[in-house]
Amino acid sequence: MTSVLDYFATLVADDDTLPVTETALTLAQDAYPDVDLQATLAEIDELALRLKRRLPGEATLTDRIGTLNRFFFRELGFAGNVNDYYDPDNSHLNIVLKRRRGIPISLAVLYMELGEQIGVSVKGVGFPGHFLLRVTLPEGDVMLDPTTGQSLSEAQMVDMLEPYLSHSSGDSIGNALRMLLQPATGREIIARMLRNLKAIYVQTERWQRLLAVQQRLVILLPGSIEEVRDRGFAYARLDYLRPALEDLERYLDDRPDADDAMAVESQLHELRQRTDHGDDDQG
């Protein structure tokens, strides 16, 4: 039987074939082990069929986007979960489908899937603080807010960007904006979803859930030694001392001059003492 992490590793093995919707849905397995992935994917396909029936035979690209927006936001009622933005279920597509509420990136994943199924090229954009959608029309690209479907002007996006920039000139803000509006890769989308969950679980001290997220991040981002370090810290929180030692030692071997090297070494010292005293409950 394939484990949850083996399945995830298979999905994210190749950037060219990474299925964003299916991979995003698997994140729910950590909170909902019995989630029926195929039934949920079939539910999304059924929504796409309903959407297709609303399209006239010779629908233009503009027609398709208009119909998609009406279907997604008005008929189905998808919207941002403004009442409980930091609920982890906002990142679990099975629950987002049921509640019709989510955060920008989870709504964007569903919107992109429906768009793809009706022949509309919609790209995700990893904008700071608020994931966006980028739709290419004959007259140019349009940026959409995935919580409302509204198009965003450059001035609106500059306003959204300003809190994330130190004192910058208009030219540098414009350049930063153009860089930030590049389409996100599938791997970047999944990493952002995982890091959203990571931030929530750190804040709420849900260490077992955090470890599950860290396991996925280490698989997804094999070049990121920082995620190995953070998995080590998660192991330590759960008293999995030996795997914690392995991860943190691996981090320092790779980054001996890291800014946090002293803090990591201090954690390692404590872990070694506890291991010597036989405190590792998990073996």
Image: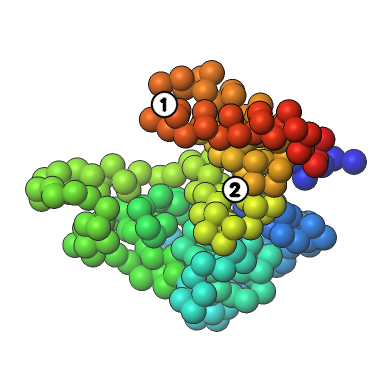
Picture coordinates of residue 116, whole percent (x, y): 55, 54
Say what amino acid the circle numbered 1 marks: Ala
Checking the image for residue 200, the label placed there is: none
Reading the chain from its start, which is encountered first: label 1 or label 2?
2
Q: Quadrant of residue 29?
A: bottom right
The answer to whether residue 227 shows anywhere in this view is yes
* Residue at 69% in and 52% down: 208
Left or right: residue 3 versus residue 169 is right
Mark count: 2
Picture coordinates of residue 195, whole percent (x, y): 52, 49
Residue 65 vertical position relative to residue 121 in the rendered view, above or below: below
Q: Quadrant of the N terminus?
A: top right
The answer to whether residue 67 shows anywhere in this view is no
* Residue at 13% in and 49% down: 167
In three-dimensional space, the C-alpha distance between marks 1 and 2, rounded to whole angstroms, equals 33 Å
Q: Secondary structure at mark 2?
A: helix
* Residue at 13% in and 48% down: 168
Crowd rating for badge 1 (residues with CA inside 10 Å; few <14, some 14–19, many 20+): few
Residue 268 vertical position relative to residue 49 in the rendered view, above or below: above
User: Which of 197 and 18 lies nearest the eye of the viewer?
Assistant: 197
Picture coordinates of residue 13, whole percent (x, y): 65, 32
Say what amino acid the circle numbered 2 marks: Val
Checking the image for residue 258, the label placed there is: 1
Checking the image for residue 20, the label placed there is: 2
Residue 245 vertical position relative to residue 201 in the rendered view, above or below: above
